[in-house]
Image (spheres, helix red, strand yellow):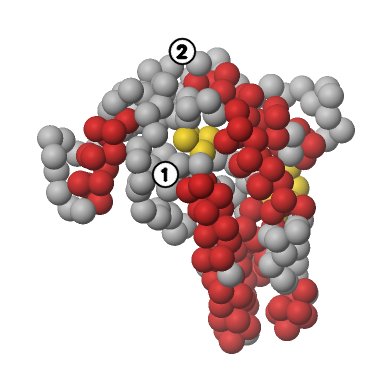
Amino acid sequence: MDIMILKTKPDAAKSFERISAWLGHEIIDSVPVQFHRQDMTNKIDKSISGWDSLKARWFDSEYQVNRFIKSILDREFLAESFPVFWPNLGPDIFAALYGLELEYAEETSYAIHNNDPISDLLKKLELCKENLYFKKLEEMTALALEMSDERYFVGYSDFHPGFDTVAAWRNPETVSLDILMDPEGVKQLLKKSTDDFQSVFDHFHNILRKHNQPSVNWMEVPTKGKFHVPS
């Protein structure tokens, strides 16, 4: 793929070279370096006037994309630091694609766990690409691409299958007991949590690649191939 030259980062191509070399266990002129500054003045607006709930604010795609764009104005992205928008609906978003509901707070969301017997839970869990959360990720991704104007990259949401997803479905305390009481059931949950991951990842990868986006997520390390952080 050709590297998109960002208006906010004219040296993007060179930074890509450093990252690619690093991933290949090589160094061109230096290892990749990122700089992040926590701006304590840019706190989340705690007002939900205009929204019925915190969840409604999280789900307001236009608000989320505009808020991100505002955050990168007049910023300088040094070395291998990049402006990256990734649709964020909370750390348990992958678990929610199977019908789990999320409860939203100011800065994160929480899974509403299911403590039914694992045999019953397995019958209920089913990946659905028409799911409210899945469609919202698609909408947010499309809007971010439309509004980017070559100012930032658009990446994937925080997908992590495996035991993180199982813990979201069950509850960390409950699944700890499950390991002792129903280890076979836990293995079945783990399998369910990973069987569909590639299709979900590829779904969004294909959307982004059609718009000449690199493979990038919350870690903000863009690559030419496919890049994922297993949590």
Determine which quarter of the picture holds residue 212.
top left
Check disc 1 and report the residue beneath it. 214
Of residues 201 and 110, the one nearer the viewer is 201
Q: Which mark is residue 40?
A: none
Judge from the rendering whether residue 116 lies leftward or rightward of residue 164; answer left or right: right
The CA span between labels 2 and 1 is 23 Å
The residue at the point 52 percent across, 60 percent down is: 202
Q: Residue furthest top?
A: 74
Q: Across the whole image, how many numbered discs are drawn on residues?
A: 2
In this orientation, does residue 113 appear? no
* Circle 2 SS class: loop
Residue 118 percent coordinates (x, y): 71, 79
- What amino acid does circle 2 point to? Asp
Residue 18 visible from this viewpoint? yes
The 10 Å Cα crowd at callout 2, few under 14, some 14 to 19, many 20 or more, is few
Amino acid type at image mark 1: Pro
Q: In this view, does 162 lie above or below 185?
A: above
At which x and y percent is residue 25? 17, 53
